[in-house]
Amino acid sequence: KLGLEVGKEEDFSRWYQQVLTRSDMLDYYDISGCYIIRPWAYHVWQTIQEFFDKKIKTLSVKNCYFPMFVSQRALEQEKDHIEGFAPEVAWVTRAGSSELDEPIAIRPTSETVMYPYFAKWIRSHRDLPLRLNQWCSVVRWEFKNPQPFLRTREFLWQEGHCAYIDKAGADSEARAILAFYKSVYEYLLAVPMIDGVKSEKEKFAGGLYTTTIEGYVPATGRGIQAATSHNLGQSFSKMFNVVVEDPNSPANANGDAAKLNVWQTSWGLSTRTIGVMVMVHGDDKGLVMPPRVSEIQVIIIPTGLTTKHTDKDRALVHNACLDLVSQLTKVDIRADADLRENYTPGFKYNHWELKGVPIRLEIGPKDLEKNSVLSVRRDTFAKASLPLENIEETIANLLETIQSDMLAKATRERDAGVRMVLSWDEFVPALNNKCLCYIPWCNTSECEDAIKERSSRAEVGDEPQDEKAPSMGAKSLCIPFNQPTNPPLVPGETKCIQCGNLATVYGLFGRSY
Ligand SMILES: O=C1CCCN[C@@H]1CCCn1cnc2cc(F)c(Cl)cc2c1=O
Ligand SMILES: [Mg+2]
């Protein structure tokens, strides 16, 4: 059975799973929380990898690869920090029929794998800056219900880990990386992001501060953390003893120079990117692929051939399709033709709409007479008859138009889903209206806890809350770099909407993934 059996607004999580499986992006696996990433989705990940890899190379970041196994001793080096995570660490305890002397952890992230080697390799300030990245998978044995691409027990990501002589080096690199993450979403995936800094409560506990890009899913009204870039400060270099001689401090009386713990960053982006793209752009006919990341950008389908037509007519139309494929391919447009004999044009239209191919071109005998082709946009379903003359440029321009129209549409929907909320009694109604909220806030953790508590809806009876009415409270998503100015927050005057103390920032709050 082709097509979707459930609408996006009707039952979002069923829609999401169905669109992923029926578009051949993903398949389910017999281990819960694990999924198979099929070529249609893997192409998106590879496009992101190529794009982001090129960007980090402009910062002289080098790729490398560390083992996936972490000894118990190494993992527990940062005891205080990981104790919250301990339940999700996966362990290897046996090989074949023999127990291992020591259990070995599978990396959930690689700080404890890498930083002992940072300590070994970084001995002098001349060894700085050190900038490493690895593309790999990590395992976190999550217990909350898994969601394909969004919350999985194994996922693909990149993790960058750098070391600098001073805070400025870490500050500027963390922000440069965050800008690259934002462009992965806005330039490649046509999804708008709000960038900012995490609250003390939400930041990576081991670090100095966490910067983040936050997405918004209109269909559920929930925010989603789309990537993070941390300035770790010197806490990890103290924990792992990553020390150099301070080049700016003169040697003391007996000749030893002052020691300096390096300043570190770490940053990560994962296959969650694909889930965000599907949730934001997908519709009731299936995926809507942004042209820049779609494996097929143009699908060409023969049409208008009836039993009245001769084999010669059919051959003429098929050849015209193949000629068009090669013309477009020559100018680096990813085009293909669906010449399968055993399916009707209508069936094919549904199939390629389900897969979200940005442009469909329909060619039949009448089109050949007029030397034209009928184009149909996947995002708007707008149809246009295009002359075959100069078709390459026409299609290239149309793909660019689709890409920018998709970002514009997603940005309009995101802006419509984010509200200025200046009093508490507007807050929960806004959340229940599927909105994120900018609120004047005192930026304290206890107030953040109170906001989460006061905004979580008591479970109605014991029937499970469905996706549309999440019972969860609102979290702080970020303190946006771009602080709202309308109305301006007046320091010393504007009050926090929750506790009434002076507000120091606008915080972006919302229910989230
Ligand atoms: O977010 C990033 C970007 C890429 C490199 N890492 C950082 C921090 C990751 C936090 N984090 C996240 N999840 C974790 C799960 C665990 F089981 C353990 Cl032991 C540790 C962590 C943990 O430190
Ligand atoms: Mg986690």
Image (tube, rainbow, N blue to C red):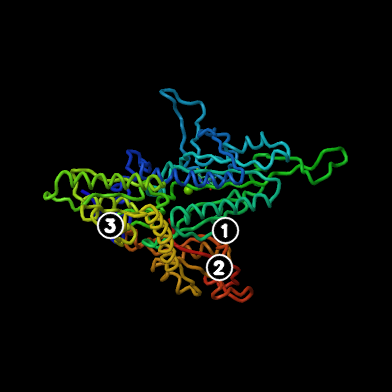
Residue 386 sits in quarter: bottom left
User: Along the polypeptide, which appears first: circle 2 or circle 1?
Assistant: 1
Label 3 CA crowd tier, 10 Å (few <14, some 14–19, many 20+): some
Q: Residue at x 58, y 44 (%)?
A: 57
* Residue 463 visible in image: no
User: Along the polypeptide, which appears first: circle 3 or circle 1?
Assistant: 1
Find disc 3 in the rendering and name its residue: 374
Find disc 1 in the rendering and name its residue: 197
Alpha carbons under labels 3 and 1: distance apart: 48 Å
Q: Amino acid at mark 2?
A: Tyr
Please state, as top left, top right, bottom left or bottom right, where the C terminus lies in the image: bottom left
Q: Residue at x 41, y 46 (%)?
A: 332
Q: Amino acid at mark 1?
A: Val
User: Along the polypeptide, which appears first: circle 3 or circle 2?
Assistant: 3
Alpha carbons under labels 2 and 1: distance apart: 12 Å
Q: Horizontally, is 264 left or right of 187 in the view? A: right
Q: For disc 2, does the CB lie below 8 Å from ligand 1?
A: no
Q: Position of residue 249 (x, y in %)?
A: 81, 46
Depth check: give the residue in front, 388 or 204: 388
Mark 1 lies on a secondary structure that is strand
Whether the residues at callouts 2 and 1 have beta carbons within 8 Å, the answer is no
Whether the residues at callouts 3 and 2 have beta carbons within 8 Å, the answer is no
